[in-house]
Amino acid sequence: MGSEYYVTYTSSEDLSAEVAELLSSIEESFSTKVESSVVSRINAAGVGSISLTEEESAVLERCFALAEASEGAFDPAILPLVKVWGFDPPYLMNGEVPPTQEAINAAKAISSYTLFTYSRQNATITKSLAGAELDLGAAIKGYAAERVRDLVKDKASEALVYVGGTIAAVGKNYEIGVTPPRDSEESFAFRFTLKTGEICATSGDYERFYTYEGVRYHHILDGKTGYPATAGVISATVVGEDGLLCDALATAVVVLGAEKGAALLEKCGAKGAIVTSDKKIVDCGLSVIVKDKSYEIA
Ligand code: ADP
Ligand code: MG
């Protein structure tokens, strides 16, 4: 998944091998970088159906449900656009020059979850347009964190799980500081309490980006425009018990903007904190404490 993980825990057992094995198996199932993964098999296939294992089916069901609920703000089939912008590994970002409008239009036409039909009953996914491709990168680290949490919760009295920026708390509450999305003297912009069993995920426009002719181009794309999201959200943190959902929602909120994003969090039963480009923090039930005084609660 191109990221690091760690788990700190209190237990009489050594859980490291089990955790590593679980994360490898998730990567093998869902990474675009692994040829045998379900995602790669779907992407390599033409028009038609692919049958899914129980786990693949469950993950895709959750991804497609959020694609619908967010009206494509989280779009698990946005890979052609991600590629044209160069935000896929090895992250060359198209030489830090935006792609041509023509290239964006061509990729946009084949980037949509609506080009796939997921069937729970048949445990299949069907592609209706050759060239359409899946990328679960915006949700799978949350899924991985959730699976690791569930693995360690019966074996460790306390644990903090970190998978590529998605964090789970087990056995006690943890104070979590969120990275300032802009240059800061502080190590975190604000903090909140992650309760035992909960997972948090943060997405923002500061993680992978470049500036071209004074405009910031970042890695969270709006499938409706074909461009990096410009809805005025620079960082979105989402908290809940469903890790996959929190991770995917964090990405969706950056695309939707603060107002629609907050409404989607409420609809999905998640908490969060949304930071806008004018450095206001929209607190959606997290009771955040501000550290970097250049930010203020909206
Ligand atoms: P990261 O995984 O970098 O921490 P995210 O969870 O926000 O951050 O995922 C961003 C990645 O997801 C991008 O690098 C890209 O591969 C993909 N992506 C970009 N825009 C979207 C989108 N609107 N919906 C789903 N996936 C997206
Ligand atoms: Mg995400």
Image: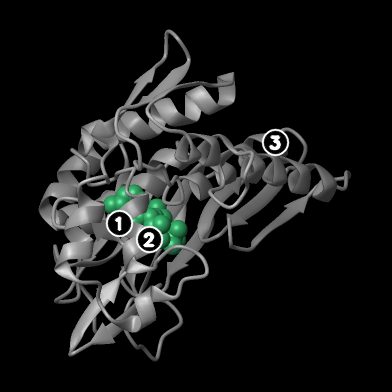
Measured as percent of width and height from the top left, residue 101 is found at 15, 67
- Which secondary structure, mark 3? helix
Q: How far apart, in angstroms, are the residues tagged by discs 2 and 3?
A: 34 Å
Q: Do the residues labelled 2 and 1 touch (CB within 8 Å)?
A: yes
Q: Nearer the viewer, mark 2 or mark 3?
A: 2
Q: Which of marks 2 and 3 is nearer the N terminus?
A: 2
- For residue 25, above or below residue 185: above
- For residue 259, above or below residue 64: below
Q: Is mark 2 within 8 Å of ligand 1?
A: no
Residue visible at 48% across and 30% down? 59
Q: Nearer the viewer, mark 1 or mark 3?
A: 1
Amino acid type of disc 3? Answer: Leu
Q: Do the residues labelled 2 and 3 touch (CB within 8 Å)?
A: no
Measured as percent of width and height from the top left, residue 42 is found at 48, 34
Q: How far apart, in angstroms, are the residues tagged by discs 2 and 1?
A: 5 Å
User: Relative to 41, is 245 on the left or the right?
Assistant: left
Q: Is mark 3 within 8 Å of ligand 2?
A: no
- Which secondary structure, mark 2? helix
Q: Can residue 192 be seen in this view?
A: no
Q: Categorize mark 1 by other alpha carbons within 10 Å: few (<14), some (14-19), many (20+).
A: many
Q: Name the residue under label 3.
A: 151
Q: Name the residue under label 2.
A: 83
Q: Which of 246 and 51 is in front in this view?
A: 51
Q: Is mark 1 within 8 Å of ligand 1?
A: yes
- Quarter holding the C terminus is bottom left
Q: Which of 119 and 63 is in front in this view?
A: 119
Measured as percent of width and height from the top left, residue 3 is found at 59, 62
- For residue 215, above or below residue 26: below
Amino acid type of disc 1? Answer: Leu
Q: Nearer the viewer, residue 76 or 155?
A: 76
Q: Name the residue under label 1.
A: 81
- Quarter holding the N terminus is bottom right
